[in-house]
Image (spheres, helix red, strand yellow):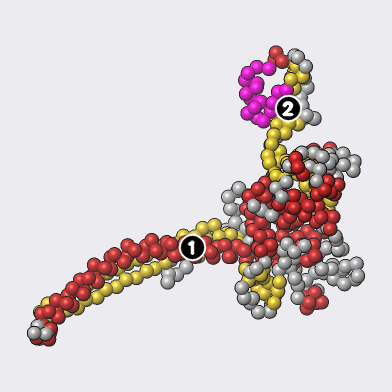
Amino acid sequence: MDDRARPGVAWKLRFWRAATLCVIAPCVVGCVGPKAVSYTRLRYNEVVRDTNDQQLLLNIVRLRYADSPIFIDLPNITSQFEVAARGNYMGGYGNQTPGPASLGIGDLSFRDTPTLSYHPREGREIAKALLTPLSADLFIVVNAGANLEQLLLFSVNDINDVPNAPRATTLVPKSSEDNSRYLRAIRLLTSLREQEATELVFGTDEETEGASEPISRSRVEARDLLNAARDGYVYRAQGTDQVTLHKREKTLYLRISPHFIDSPEMVEVTSLFHLTPGLSKYRVKSELDDEANRKSPTPLGGDTIFINTRSILQIMTFLSKGVCIPEEHLVSGVAPTTPGPDGRPFDWTRIMAGNFVVHFQKRRPRDAEVAVQYRGYWFYIAGNDVNSRAALSILEVEFALQESDEKPTGPVLTLPIGGR
């Protein structure tokens, strides 16, 4: 006998199908939750990274046109997931049908409702982050993998008074500038770094010029020693019955491997940067340090590398000189130009030395790493331009280190995004 001769068999089959749907639906809900987190978290990660790069590039392009940079932070993303499932089954013998009835229904829904908080950076908060010169300690990030040549090229105005095109940090330079001597020196340092001939390390430095007047040893008690150590000071013996109090500071050093102290590269570096040759290490100090004001004007700089660091705004303005500009914008004066030695507009991209370049074209570029639209053109960093991509990464690290610890003072714009 087939199923048509046995209506009860078909009814039971429909019943078990509906029952199975009702059992599976709650299980699907339990699986969707973790999957949703895995899927959306990675997407948010990618989008935040991409938009951060786009905002930095857009502001760099704006500075090339002498326009104001604007920063809008995304301090908070709150995403709420809603997953719901239900199932219903009705069956049996009723008055509306001549035989058994079977009716089943199932429903599964997924909803993602993110809320985005935007914070325009303004006032003292952004001014402090943009205008404060970087600390010389920043260069320890080289040990974390940052490219030394790029870091020294973008972040420094001069080293021991050897200039690195400081006019390029102004929005509208009045004259062109050359940084070939500086480039030669930092490329030698980079070459030594790649040969593992140098390393940047922190050490303790004692100031002798700021030492106290001699103190009788008998007047110094144990608690004085402890208090001095707590505050960063140390007592040093002066003869048999006297001591002096010295300030101890954490100092950054450029240490030279013994095999490279007298190498041709290191000898040339010391000559270019006015350093005393033959030393195993050199202190790295900011020119904002008090000691920089006491440095000798002699041709040799001694054992200290004095670095005149830039602010984030100066770095971004310097990087903007690597932005290629459409000819029509140069001719019309939309983008500022600087006359070169031949009277023609000076090509500022040459000071970037291949470390950072931004191209332009009318249509949206394909395979670009970062692209933004501005003044009728697309400005972009090519996907295979590793140096320019690394430059953006260095800028992001420097910006993060310079950010103020103060709480945001500007308005926070919170936007709920409809579910999908």
Does 232 lie within the magenta span? yes
Nearer-N-terminus badge (1/2): 1
Bounds of the magenta segment: 220-236
Residue at numbered disc 2? 246
**Is 299 positioned to the left or the right of 65 in the image?**
right
Q: Is residue 89 magenta?
A: no
Residue 315 picture quarter? bottom right
Dot 2 lies on which element? strand
Q: Nearer the viewer, residue 78 or 338?
A: 338
| Vertical arrangement, residue 97 with respect to residue 285, above or below | below
Q: Which residue is mark 1?
A: 42
Q: CA distance from mark 1 to mark 2?
A: 53 Å
For disc 2, the neighbor class at 10 Å (few under 14, some 14 to 19, many from 20) is: many
Query: Callout 1 environment at 10 Å: few (<14), some (14 to 19), or many (20+)?
Result: few
Out of 303 and 80, give the one closest to the viewer: 303
Image quadrant of residue 316? bottom right
